[in-house]
Amino acid sequence: NAGVTQTPKFRILKIGQSMTLQCAQDMNHNYMYWYRQDPGMGLKLIYYSVGAGITDKGEVPNGYNVSRSTTEDFPLRLELAAPSQTSVYFCASRRDGNQPQHFGDGTRLSIL
Amino acid sequence: EDKVVQSPLSLVVHEGDTVTLNCSYEVTNFRSLLWYKQEKKAPTFLFMLTSSGIEKKSGRLSSILDKKELSSILNITATQTGDSAIYLCAVEPHTGNQFYFGTGTSLTVIP
């Protein structure tokens, strides 16, 4: 039972490059979330999804895009990487609105 | 704007001490409050508190929700070095399916 799996664990990008952070869960959860965590700033919600084909913006969506074509996968896309996007990114999922979130181990992203 | 504030920001105690961590919130149409423990990687779930479950306990950890004061406390008794972590508080309103996180309390337990 893998839970929530994020890849890659670490990545260094140059300014202007693009990349996709992968998130997959094997718990058949409907709800999935992407957060970023900056030092001393807590977790900020980027995007979330309540089911396949449905996505919504969170608090800090600018510079990111998501898609949810299957229940299992929720990739996060950075189109034009900027230094301000240097952060640790966490993906999370939960079964429904009465359950806590389960988190992946995170992706540490540096943009230079 | 919805807001979650945790205090203190950091705390250093000796093994065996008891600690109390605080979380206050200003969230429209409150649904639930959650506590997480974060060591090196992913936050791990500790407790979920709702209007129908305002007090939870697991071993040396316990948490209480005060809906009148819009706050919650997390107590850890007889602290151990393994309790060293960042403790995160998150609040979910009834609308929007989102969680709002505080900045966390960093707890260090010295042997």
Image (spheres, coloured by chain):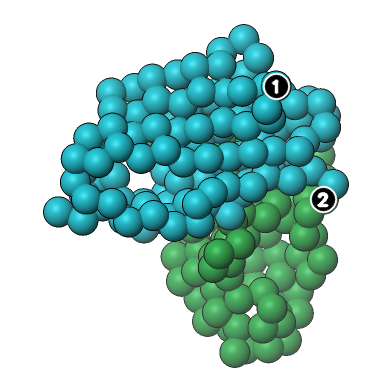
Up the image or down, A107 lies above or below A85; here it is above
Q: Quadrant of the C terminus of chain B?
A: bottom left
Amino acid under disc 2:
Lys
Q: Mark 2: which secondary structure?
A: strand
Give residue B56's mark: none
Residue A49 screen position, x and y as percent: 74, 40
Q: Residue at x 79, y 43 (%)?
A: B2
* Colour seen for chain A: green
Q: Quadrant of residue A2?
A: top left
Q: Colour of chain B?
A: cyan
Is residue A51 or residue B62 the one in the foreground? B62
Provide the residue designation for mark 1.
B68
Q: Quadrant of residue B51?
A: top right
Tell me the residue that label 2 is attached to: A57
Image coordinates for residue A21, horizontal then vertical, percent: 60, 63
x and y percentages locating residue A43 in the rendered image: 61, 54
B85 with respect to B87 (left or right): left
